[in-house]
Image (cartoon, helix red, strand yellow):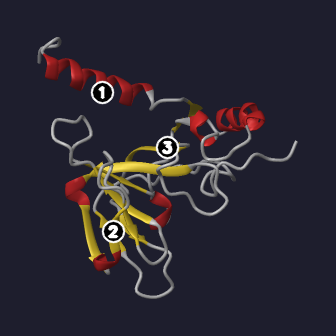
């Protein structure tokens, strides 16, 4: 069986992050007048994602996406080239109108557990970021055109890479969402 390709950043093995990593500048793929977004911290919840909304580099089955707090995100060059892909979506994905790369995606919906977080694609900012630790929305790659007969191989490869496959988010993030919801409804105090 041929090697299963997940994403160029993990296909050769998941690389550990650098201790004390303080962020980097994300750059779009335009040859001239590239959009640059400064990220002032390391990321958290780095993962590969099979959803059909996240930007993926050419040929990738999954995207690689993580989050930072929105106060650590600053567009520093050519921000006029950015446009929100879908203004009705929870994640306001700002894409470069030149190359199509998603540069940052803040969540601004009031009273949502992810409000104040911004989704980023760490491969746009070089090495050093916290390593990806799970795979989310794995079955969704079928919606993006992957042959369903390949799913066992994809899940096996994700497991081999220590990226636990899930059709939701990681258990820690799902617990965070449930806790937020329980507190907001008054079911859980504190």
Question: What residue would you read off at disc 2?
Answer: 83
Front residue (pair 159, 169): 169
Question: What residue would you read off at disc 3?
Answer: 47
Q: Is residue 128 visible?
A: no
Task: Indicate which disc, 1 or 2, sits on the residue closer to the N terminus.
Answer: 2
The residue sitting at 49% across, 43% down in the picture is 47
Is the residue 80 above or below the residue 176 in the image?
below
State the CA–CA distance, disc 1 to disc 2. Answer: 30 Å
State the CA–CA distance, disc 3 to disc 2. Answer: 24 Å
Instruction: Give the image location of residue 122, x and y in percent.
Output: 45, 58
Q: Quadrant of residue 85?
A: bottom left
The residue sitting at 29% across, 21% down in the picture is 178
Give the SS element for disc 2.
strand
Is the residue 27 above or below the residue 58 in the image?
below
Task: Indicate which disc, 3 or 2, sits on the residue closer to the N terminus.
Answer: 3
Question: What residue would you read off at disc 1?
Answer: 176
């Amino acid at each position: 069986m041929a090697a299963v390709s997940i994403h160029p950043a993990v296909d050769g093995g998941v690389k550990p992050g650098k201790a004390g990593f303080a962020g980097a500048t994300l750059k779009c793929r335009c040859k001239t007048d590239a959009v640059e977004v400064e990220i002032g911290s390391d990321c958290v919840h780095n993962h590969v994602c099979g959803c059909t909304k996240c930007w993926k580099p050419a040929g990738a089955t999954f995207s690689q996406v993580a989050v930072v707090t929105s106060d650590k995100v600053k567009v520093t060059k050519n921000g006029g080239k950015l446009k929100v892909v879908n203004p009705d979506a929870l994640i306001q994905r700002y894409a470069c109108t030149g190359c199509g790369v998603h540069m940052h995606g803040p969540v601004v919906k009031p009273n949502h557990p992810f409000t104040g977080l911004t989704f980023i694609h760490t491969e746009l900012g070089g090495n050093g970021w916290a390593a990806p630790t799970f795979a989310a929305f794995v079955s969704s790659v079928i919606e993006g055109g992957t042959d369903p007969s390949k799913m066992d191989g994809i899940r096996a490869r994700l497991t081999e890479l220590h990226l636990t496959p899930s059709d939701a988010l990681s258990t820690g993030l799902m617990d965070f969402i449930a806790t937020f919801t329980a507190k907001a409804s008054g079911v859980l105090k504190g």
